Every structure is written in structure tokens, then in C-alpha cells.
Amino acid sequence: MSKINTLEDLNKAGKRGLATLIPSGTKIMVGMATSGIASGAQDVYHALDREIRERRLDIILSRTGSMGMDCMEPLVDVLEPGKPRLAYGKITAKKAPTLLEQIAKGTIETIKPFYRMDEEESIILGKSKRYGDGSVPAYLKEIPTIKEIPFYAKQVKIATRNCGLIDPESIDEYIAKGGYSGLYKAITGMKPEAIIKEVIASGLRGRGGGGFPAGIKWKTCREAKGDVKYVICNGDEGDPGAYMDRSVMEGDPHSVIEGMIIGAFAIGSHDGYIYVRNEYPLAVANLGKAIEKAREYGLLGKNIFNSGFDFDIRISKGAGAFVCGESTALMASLEGAAGEPRAKYIHTVEHGLWNRPSNLNNVETWANVPAILTRGGKWFAGIGAQNSTGTKVFSVVGKINNIGLVEVPMGTPLKDIVYDIGGGVPHGRKFKAVQTGGPSGGCIPEKLIDLRVDFDELWKAGSMMGSGGMIVMDDRTCMVDIARYFIEFLESESCGKCIPCREGVRRMRDILEDICAGKGQAGDVELLETMSQAIIDGSLCALGGSAPNPVLSTIRYFRDEYDAHIKEGRCPAGVCKALIKYSVDSETCTGCGMCVKVCPTGAARGEKKQPHVIDEATCTRCGACLESCKFDAINVK
Amino acid sequence: MAKCIIDGKKITAPDGTPILQAARDNGIDIPTLCSHESIEPSGACRLCVVEIKKGKRSKIVTSCLYQVEDGLEVDTKSERVMNVRRLVLALLLARNPASEVIREIAVKMGVNPQPRFKLDEDKGKCILCRLCVRTCADIVGVNAIGLSHRGPSKTVGPPFDEDSSACIGCGACAYVCPTGHILMEEKVDERKIWGRRFKMKACDTCGRYFAPLDQLEFISKKTGVSVADLSICTSCR
Amino acid sequence: METARTDERTKLREIIARYHGEKSSLIAILQDIQEAYNYLPVAILKMVGQEMDIPLMRVYEVATFYNAFSLTPRGKNVVEVCAGTACHVKGAINLLENLERELEIKCGETTKDETFTLEQVRCLGCCSLAPVVRIDGNIHAYLTQQQIPDILRNYRK
Ligand SMILES: Cc1cc2nc3c(=O)[nH]c(=O)nc-3n(C[C@H](O)[C@H](O)[C@H](O)COP(=O)(O)O)c2cc1C
Ligand code: SF4
Ligand code: FES
Ligand code: FES
């Protein structure tokens, strides 16, 4: 493979990429991100592959990342010459032959696509490319376009621009979508100071949680004393219930790499690190391959674009420690030590990795950078809200219909995310709250559903942006249990260095456990509040410094649930095992015997065809009957 | 030189001086548990917190680490500060009920045990101030003991909870421990620490047993001075 | 015995050489050792200290700090129950308790026949498929208690 030194070389690679991205023949793409594979995409891929070969079909089969609608996985996209691109959801290996037959016949009779795309957008190039001549065959008119389905209608994709559209292993396809043109522009035509100015103008704030302005951080690092500087990407994504960064690293690794090269050039660094979570093997693999490809093309290594600038990247795998997402702990871990944070009175931009100036940004932050360079800081600043520009990727999960990854402009009302994009709460239950900000965040109650989601509004509501996890909760989610859950998480993830966090969080967990077990005492809530303030003030790092947030925010909005537990020994949501009872609704029970079969303790009993009963004394509230009853006859109170 | 105000008192201190030292030099007392003049501060105990004000923003910092700055206003006893200290002590009273040192400080500060905290039975007197670990690593240079595990399971001790083969029996860790958690038993010609017994060397001049043989060998290896030349106790030298 | 030791040392040296013996690669080296042995044997950790000239205490600190490392042998199949938030609100705790009953071990333990080790992880990044359990690297999505016996049977084979 020849090196890319000039714009001409870059354009040539782009042409090659376009030829596979929108080929002259038929192409089938299978969504092969981790969640796709977990839902069976691998089998689908193999089945399609086998069929295509056996039938000697002239079809190109390729892999791609995830477009975000994960509840429809496995996802298969079909692109035939001259036709719109069609997206099929929930495709199984068994359906593969049918799908191929249908393509051969030119119909959508048996398996219906759930949307069509008439054109492919490229946010970097600032234009769209129509598939074929842009006409839509009559039989496809009934299929909604991607912009017509509520899940996508309000989304604007910048950070996840290529996920699910390109083959993450193809650098040419990345280039065809305008990739590395931002780098070209930066390195060959701009002074480092001008690049930083552009990033400052964009208003881009860190997507890893803190929301610190990226351009300012770069500037401080550039100005910091030292010949050797480091540029680091935080791919630790420790917040449970969040997977935005995984999706980007797996589905579009070059966007992160390109962002880092631009940043390194602006800061004056020649060594980069990507710290990836241990639980993300596919992200590590795809990043590794992408780095190799970028090296082959000379986009990493010596003398990039003949500019005399050298830069290379190494991947470092985490080993399972949430605290290693914290900047100083991450750097300790990169140095090969236990990930203990240190006091940040001395900033890492001046004294970071190996005590040298180090600039750390989150995956999504980096992925935004190439777009800012090509489209300009002003363009980016025009999207989103006043002090929170651009877009944010959220993983909308939990008790919600359309589970998936969404990217919306900052300032989008929470209501739009939950109801329009997310499609509301399933099983006709009542929406209760959204948890944002991971373990450092809080719960936004139903009454604040009109809140516009950006850094400052979330903060005002007692929560945080965090990395972008949004866990939707319904009336069957106990808010005391959620507080207990996060505190228990943080207890086990505390590094153990400082006393307020190590000992204080543990004692908070004891108290919350008592409350959930019906052993709460009068004054517990007040004690939790006093402890919270001392832990926030007294902890060494932001893990302890924000650990009480889930407790404080649930007390603030759901004090009644705490009181119900403590004063009445009742768990209104029916979650806390010590406070609930399982029973059978004799009206709806058909006596099918399913609960009897699954109950591990023999507490569920009854004659066939007669209403069953649950013996309270032997019932362990394991939920097996609830889960298996087809008639919704099990009551939990 | 930096000019700042601590508890209303105008103070000048050389740049780079931690607030803790600047305060103490001026007769203002701040309680500490994990700081020691010859060991780099780690900021683990959080007892030394103070509230600082720069312009309108105020925040809580550890005085052992935070250095004086021009125009800084420091309050060493604000309500927020005391709330942190009270919690730290209540937590330690529950973690180390056997520690007299903790009890004394708590009494002095008027902190009572929090009845909602169950007393630990397995932590001994160790408050994880890490002074012993830092001494062993940074001062003695042996790395015989360290901090293993994390979070609430964090413990101080030799690797694999075995007798430490690296230990030279110098006893510096026991000396520096503020609560007396580390046990060092001494018989005339033998010392026991971290589960290991160390033969003591008698002074060639006065005959008093003065140091473990392992320690002399360690020093000899490091400095190139023979063990024989090291076998005279400090008082006879 | 002696040759076994030498073999192990050779194997370890190979692993260390992958990272050019860099001390900062200690975590990666331990990961590779765990990959090779399925856990971190004490004897090997002691060798790591010697070979890399790192105090044994530092090796032990790192080996015990990170969740991914195990100092005790693990079973043939590692069962990891996701305890991330999305899985938690969808009843992951019931799955865990069910697995504890089925395998007759507590979370963190290994069955006597060394077939299974039961562990908890924090989010596998497949929150859209909650609740999930990962066995031997395979993710089982939308898992119900009812499916557990059949799934375990497949791995017992
Ligand atoms: C306990 C803790 C965990 C964190 N985890 C992450 C993480 O998983 N990913 C991340 O990008 N930032 C994480 N952060 C934030 C980082 O410390 C840091 O602010 C961020 O990576 C900087 O990048 P940004 O400015 O681009 O957001 C964490 C912070 C704390 C205190
Ligand atoms: S706040 Fe928690 S995680 Fe941070 S240093 Fe203290 S103990 Fe460690
Ligand atoms: S003395 Fe400052 S934190 Fe312990
Ligand atoms: S919460 Fe279980 S996979 Fe994320």
C-alpha cells in the first residue's frame, strides 16, 4: 500500500473507498458491533455468506458498526444499484435465504425493511450523496425514510457520523466519507495556534463528564513547559449502562485517531495513548487494525503529509477498575501501577503521564474534532445550546421501547428523547425518572421532563451529563434501591486511598441496605445528607467527590419513597425483597402450572386448572414465577 | 514569597510552602494523621482539610498538599471543614475501635462515635495512612510492604500476606506508624516483625544488640561498606 | 519439577519480550499471563518481579488492584453476570441468585469440578440487550431464569 503524502493521494484513496461504500453491484451490510454479535449477527453473516457462495450470487457482503437502533438487532442493510438503501431489523440466520430470494425478485414481500435511506449523508463533506439517480421505485414508497421514523427524525450525527455506514476496517471508506481531510487541512494549512483557536471557537466541551472546554485544555498543554508531551484518549467508559464510546471505537475508529493526530499537532506531541476498557475486546481489535492501516498510509508515524510532523499511537488495555477513568488514575495505570488518583492541585496538562504535560480527552470529544476542522468551529457552535455546543451521544436504555444509541443536539428536551426517540415506557407502565451521569449523576424525575439536556441544565437539576448514559426507569424501579445500587458500585470501585470515600461510602451503603431491608431508622435520611456533604467536600478525587450524588438526588425528588421504606416498611415499587410479597391473582390465574414448575422452593403450588397460590413463608421473591407467567397473574406488592 | 491570610492572620511564606506548614509556623494548629515531615504528603486521611477562598469561589483542600498563594484566604475551622473532620473521625472510630490515638483526637475535637456505624473487628489499628509504606519504599528503599487490594478491602502488609522475604527488619514502619498497628517484638538477640524473626547483631565494641543482621547486609550491599565495618553501634562509633 | 520451572520461565520471558521488558507494561504482561494460565499463579508473579526487576510488592499491588486479575484458579467456563445499571433495573440480581443456586456456589467462587466460575461485571456495553450474562466470552442476551439450566448444560458438555 502506498503512502498518502498529498491531497491527490488522499482523494485516490477516497475514490477506492467510494467504490466499496456504494459499489456498482448489490451490497449487504451486517451490523457487527458487540451488541449486534451478541444478538446473533455473526450467525446471520455466516448464513448470508454461505448462501451467496452456494448460489454464486454477485453480492458483496460487508460488516459495519451500529446505527444505534440496537433494539432491532441483528441489523442488515441492503444496497442495490439504483435503489435506496434498505434497513432490515431482527434478521436471523434462518431468514437469510428468504432475504436473498426477495432481493433477487426485487420485492419486499416476506421481510419488510423498517426504513429506507434515499441518500447517504456526509457531515464532514457537508453534503449528501443520492443512491443511484435518487428515484424511489414504487414498491418502496410505503417504507418510511430514515428521517420519517421517530427514532432518527431528531438525531444529528457528528461523533457517530460513520457508525453503521462504513466498514470500520476500511480506511478507504473512512476517507471516502471525508475522513483525514480535516487532518490534511490542519497539518498542511494551519498553524497549531490557529487549530486551537478553531476548537475554542467551536465551544467543544469534554464529553467524558466534566465538560471542560477542549480548546482551552489544548492551549494550556501547548503552553506547558516540556519537550515531551502526551496526547491521551480516555476509552475507559466505566459508567455502567453506557456504551457510546464503545460504539465509536468499534464502528469508526479512525475518527478518534484522526482527532488525536490533529490534537497532537496542535499541542506539539508525538506520542499518543488510547486507554481502552478491558471489557471491550472488539474495540481494542478494531482500533488496533485502524492504527496499523493509518501507519501503512503514513498518516501515523514519521513525517505525516510531508510536514515533518511525527506522531504515533499505542493502545493500552485497562484491567477492570472504574476509577481508572479518572485522569490521574488513568495515567498511573498507563505507567503500569495501581490506579490510585492523586490530588489535582497540580494539573495533568502540566504534570501528567511520567510527570510530563499530558492532554486527556474522551473518545467522543476526539471524534468530534475532525468535523470541527473541516466544517469550522463556527458551524459546530451553531449546533446545540448556548454553552453546550454541538451534539451529545446518549445510550438510552432501561425501561424504554426503542433502546439504543442516539445523537442529538445539546439542549434537546428530555421529553423528545424519552417519548419521540425512545418511544416511551414499555408495557403501558408509568415513566418515573431518567438516571443520567452514571454513578456520579442523579435521577431526573418525571416532573422535569421538559428539561433541555445540556451540561448546565443537568447540573442545576442535581445530576450530570456524565458520559451519556440515560437509564429510563418506570414505576417498578425503586429509587432507594437505585441509590443503594450506585453506592454499592462506588464502594467496590473506590480506590481506597482516602478515608471519606473508602470508609464513608461503605457506611452509606450499610445504611441504605438497612433501609431496603426494612431496618431503616428515623434520622437516617438526615444522616445520609450530612455524610454526603462531608464526603463531597473531603474526598481526594471526583469519584468520592460525586459519589453521594445518586443518594442526594433521589432524596431530593423521591423523599416519599425513603419515608415509605423507613416509616411504613413498604417498597412502593415492589423491588426491595424484604418488604414485598408475591401472590397470585386468582381471577387471572388459569392454573397452567408454570409457576409451580419454575419456583425453586416449592412456594408456588396448586392443582392444574385451579387458581394457584404462593406460600409466603417459603417464597424467596426470586421473581421466577413473575417472569414466566404468561397471564400476568402474579402480583408483587 | 506568598502573602496570604490564615484564620484572619496575615502571613508571608516562601512559595511552595504547604498551607499546613505555613499555619503551624504561625501557631495555628491543624490536625493531621497521614503527614510526616520527612515523607512526601499523600493526602490520604483528609483530616487536615481547610477552606480556601480565591476571589468569590471557595473550596475545601488538604492543607498538607495545597501550597500558599498570593491573596489566598484560608479558614482552618469553618463549618464545612469541621463537618469533614467530624466524619473522618467518626469513620475511624468505627473502623479502629481499638486505637487509643484516634479516640484521643476524637475526644479532643468533641466527636462522638456514630451509633449507626457498626464497629469493625478485623482492621486492627491501621487507618491506612500509608506512612509505613512510603517509609519502606522511599526512605529505606526496600519495598517489603505495600498496599494491596482496593476500596474497603485495602490492606497494608507484605506481598501475598506471606512473611516478607524482602523485609530487613529495620522497624522503620513500626516507628512511623501513628496508631501503633505494626507490632514489633524484641527479645535480646531477636526481633519479630511482619511474621518474620530477625537475628540481631551485637555491637563489636559494647556488645549491645543494636540492629538486625539483614539490615546490616542490606546497607552493606547498597553502600559497599563491609558488614564487619558496620558492626559498631551508633553510640560506640 | 526443575524443567517445568525452566519451561515456565521461558514462557514468561516470551511474554515479557512482547513488551520489550518495559516496566510500564506490567498490566499488559499480567493480562497475558492470566490469558495463558487462566489466573495469576503466585510462583509466576514472583518470577515476574525477578525478571522485570520490579519489587514483588509492586507486582502484588497491581495484581490485587484490578478486577480482571484472579489470584486463584478459575473454572473452565467463566460466567459473568452483568451488574450494570441497565441490567440491574431489569432484574440482574435475580439472575445472579439463580446462577448461585444452579451452580451451588457464591458469586466469586468456582465449582468443585472446576467447570464454572461465577463472577459479576459492571456493564458489558450491551445494555440494549439487558439483562445479559457473558459465558466464555459469549453474550447471552435478554436472559431469563428459565433459560439458565439449558444454557449451562451446553457449557457442561
Ligand atoms: C471516577 C471517574 C471516572 C471517570 N471515568 C471516565 C470514563 O470512563 N471516560 C471518560 O472519558 N472520562 C471519565 N472521567 C472523566 C475524566 O477524568 C476526564 O475528565 C475526561 O476523560 C477528560 O476528557 P474530556 O475533557 O474530553 O471529557 C472519569 C472521572 C472520574 C472522576
Ligand atoms: S475519592 Fe475514592 S477513589 Fe478518589 S482517591 Fe479517595 S478513595 Fe480513591
Ligand atoms: S494530613 Fe493531609 S491528608 Fe492526611
Ligand atoms: S448494564 Fe449490563 S451491559 Fe450495560
Image (cartoon, coloured by chain):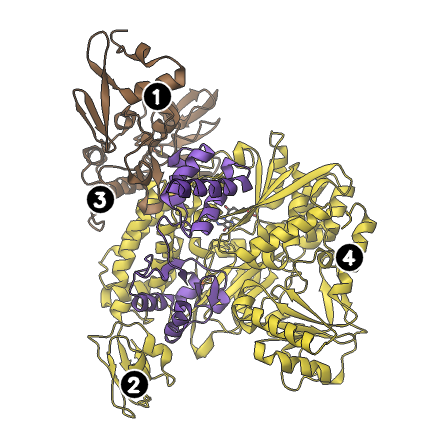
**CA–CA distance in space, label 1 to label 4:** 65 Å
Depicted A402 relative to depicted B49: above or below: below
Label 3 beta carbon less than 8 Å to ligand 2: no
In the figure, the shade used to draw chain B is: brown
Badge 3: residue crowd in 10 Å (few <14, some 14–19, many ≥20):
few
Disc marking residue A585: 2
Quadrant hosting residue B169: top left
Q: Chain of mark 1?
A: B
Badge 2: residue crowd in 10 Å (few <14, some 14–19, many ≥20):
some
Q: Which chain is yellow?
A: A
Where residue A306 appears, x then y in whole percent?
78, 40
Q: Which residue is mark 4?
A: A14
Q: Chain of mark 3?
A: B
Where residue B66 appears, x then y in whole percent?
43, 31
Label 1 beta carbon less than 8 Å to ligand 3: no
Q: Which residue is mark 3?
A: B122
Label 2 beta carbon less than 8 Å to ligand 4: no
Q: Chain of mark 2?
A: A
Please tell me which of labels 4 and 2 falls first in the chain: 4
Q: Amino acid at mark 3?
A: Asp
Q: Amino acid at mark 2?
A: Asp
Q: Which residue is mark 1?
A: B218
Q: Secondary structure at mark 3?
A: loop
